[in-house]
Amino acid sequence: MLDAPNAVPAPAARAALPAVTVVIPARNAAIYIGRTIDSALTQSGVTEIVVVDDGSTDDTMTIVRSYRDPRLRLMTNDGGGVSAARNFGARNARGSWLIFLDADDLLRPGAVTALLEAASAAPRAVLVYGDYNTIDSAGRQIGRRNLLKGRRKPTGDVLERLASGNFIVNGGIALVSAEAFRAAGGFDVTLRYCEDWHCWCRLAAIGEFAFVPRLLLDYRVHTASTMNAAMRTPQDFFPAVARVFDDPLILARLPANAVARLRQAAGIHLVTYSATQAVRFGRYGDVVRYLGLIGRRSLTAMPRSALKVALAFLGI
């Protein structure tokens, strides 16, 4: 599925509002799924919402079936995992653009319009993305990313920057060309973590990205989510580093003399992420240990990693 694709033409300039499919993988998401669907249904430009139930044993499917909106489609994937569910939804999507929205997150008002306008202004882009804030299980804002006014992230040919660390973080902030996604092979179902980072790198190898400097998503942080149910260690993420830097499509587009440096940077990025997660769990001994590991790998990376950990204390 993940062989190098043929060249993908950049999406043509959009004269009219193009069709957007929101793909929502769901497994035992009854407590949140209704609000997530509502946040997508209110978006201009969303012509279809595909909920892929991945083996729920609660009332998730009952809630989805209660909607009468013709844009909403329910499919089942029988417990194949979140990557398989996303791929299944994308294969069956009718839209020319895709958004991968987790079943507990919320699109902010106007999010899709902002992404479509940016896509129209960047006709060579295969992925357009913005930023997010965090909320808790009750929907209360806990993040403070609104304080980072004017923050810019990479635009254009972003592969080298992306290979050094995932700056997109959540698929709910990204509008992805359906044609490019299918050509890139979708999400690697063999990866348990960071499969999105690997997929974004493959997309960056075949097209440009564009950034929207706006908060587009409320990203719910709670103990039932995959990334927050238990504290992850760097070793959980290292298989994805190996996959990215063993991928022929990605390697063909990276300067050979930069690969070792980028691989080291990716490892440091994920150790830093582990340290910020340890902050959320109050595991401050692990924070110190992970910062020490970063220092042993690269003293020059320490100040930036320490700053990210400090911002995690502040919810940024």
Image (tube, helix red, strand yellow):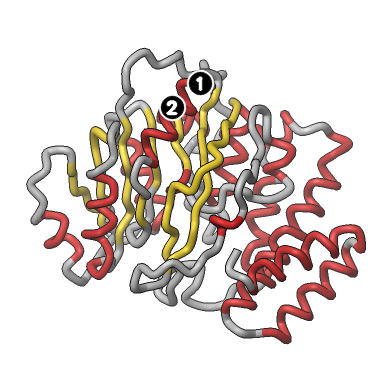
Is the Cβ of the residue at disc 1 closer than 8 Å to that at disc 2? Answer: yes
Circle 2 residue:
117
Q: Position of residue 242 (x, y in %)?
A: 70, 53
Q: Amino acid at mark 2?
A: Glu
Query: Can you tell which mark lies on residue 121?
Result: 1
Q: Position of residue 98 (x, y in %)?
A: 38, 36
Q: Classify residue 301 as left or right of residue 60.
A: right
Query: Can you tell which mark lies on residue 100?
Result: none
Residue 246 in sight: no
Residue in the image at 63% along x and 49% along y: 167
Residue in the image at 20% along x and 64% along y: 60
Q: Classify residue 288 as left or right of residue 72.
A: right
Name the quadrant containing residue 315.
Answer: bottom right
Residue in the image at 49% along x and 58% along y: 133
Q: Is residue 72 above or below residue 14?
A: below
- In depth, the one of 164 and 242 nearer the eye is 164
Residue 72 in sight: yes
Q: Position of residue 5 (x, y in %)?
A: 55, 26
- In depth, the one of 108 and 296 nearer the eye is 108
- In depth, the one of 313 and 127 nearer the eye is 313
Q: CA distance from mark 1 to mark 2?
A: 6 Å
Name the quadrant containing residue 268.
Answer: bottom right
Quadrant location of the C terminus in the rendered image: bottom right
Q: Is residue 307 above or below residue 187?
A: below
Q: Secondary structure at mark 1?
A: helix
Q: Classify residue 114 as left or right of residue 47.
A: right
Residue in the image at 64% along x and 32% along y: 155
